[in-house]
Image (cartoon, rainbow, N blue to C red):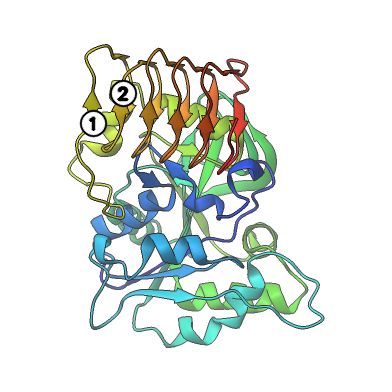
Amino acid sequence: MKNVLGLVNIQEDNSLIRELTASRAVELVPFAGRYRLVDFTLSSMVNSGIGHVGIMLPDRPRSVLDHVRSGKEWDLSRRHEGLFYLPSVKVERESREGDLKNFYANADFFEHSAQKYILLTSGSFIYNIDFDELMKFHEDSGADISLMYHIEKGENTGKNAVIETAGDGKVEDIAEKPAVYDGSKMSLGVYLMEKRVFVDIVRNAYEHGGNDFLVDGIIKNAGKYKLFAKEHDGYVAHVESMSAYYKSSMDLLRYEVWQELFMGKNPIFTKVKDEVPVQYKEESEVKNALIANGCVVYGSVENSILFRGVKVGKGVKIKNSVIMENCDLKDGALIENVICDKNVIVSKDKWLKGAPNYPLIVTKNVTI
């Protein structure tokens, strides 16, 4: 897919996951002990042979720049092409929100790129996809725009696009809904098209007062272009709410999910941080847990995920929880159904407990 320009849109709504996005974009939320959500999209692009990848930066880009940096970990630090950043645009007296204004401001860049196609993706989905299969589908179907979808199992709340397709994959309807239910065809926020089509959609939608690429660019122009959609039958999670983040994190403790995402032929890359191995002390007890390097465990950990550098004191009991980087859980603490952001300190003998389907959230740098 050397003729494809990859574009990752990191400008999504974070209103349903505010507790974890006060200082970072939703696509940069930590996940799986050592990764960020955007790693899955970036890695899937690189594994598919895309060597020119752009990131549409959010208004507060520090977390993106700190994590992705030059793109070295994804083999995108190159003399020619490789990784590039497209900053968000603030226009005086411009009241419109959404991603269209930023695509529009960078339209000349897309037009002058050497690649024929653009693969536009969202950075808040968790998957491991070979986009080369989408390209073959796009060419065989004769589509102007090719999408990808997943048949949802259960329910997913947040900003989702639901599509209906014919037997040959032609999109018959596409709509934005606040929830996706069991059996629905949920769009993965993946759009493959020729760059001339992309630029035409962006210019036309923005110049006619549009704000959002999905709503004003795709949905309102569904009758103008030939839209086809291909199913991805592997694991997918869309992290746009706290409940979705917690559920997808707990899914990682299922062997088949971890195996598909991380142990297949296509690896998931992330920013490298060298740490010492986990130290399991004599009195520790661990069951069905994912624990990253640099952790020190004296207590009990069950059905939980611990990020790098977490300290678990003596007599501590952690169950059904996500504990992010450098948290310090003092002796005797009880943690159940909890999500702790980075650098949280839980004092000696404190008990924190959330509901099974609605975890307690402890924000970054808090001492309890």
Name the N-terminal-most of marks 1 and 2: 1
State whether residue 97 appears in this view: yes
Q: Please state the total of marks drawn on the protein image.
A: 2
Residue at image position (44%, 47%) is 37
Q: What kind of element bears circle 2?
A: strand
Of the 4 image quadrants, the one containing the C terminus is top right
Residue 114 appears in which quarter of the rendering?
bottom left
Q: Nearer the viewer, residue 309 or 306?
A: 309
Kindly indicate whether the residue at mark 2 contacts the one at mark 1 (C-beta within 8 angstroms): yes
How many residues crowd mark 2 within 10 Å: few (<14), some (14–19), many (20+)? many
Q: Nearer the viewer, residue 312 or 229?
A: 312
Residue 165 lies, in percent from the top left, at: 53, 42
Residue at image position (28%, 14%) is 284
The residue indicated by pointer 1 is 278
Residue at image position (58%, 35%) is 367
Residue 112 lies, in percent from the top left, at: 43, 88
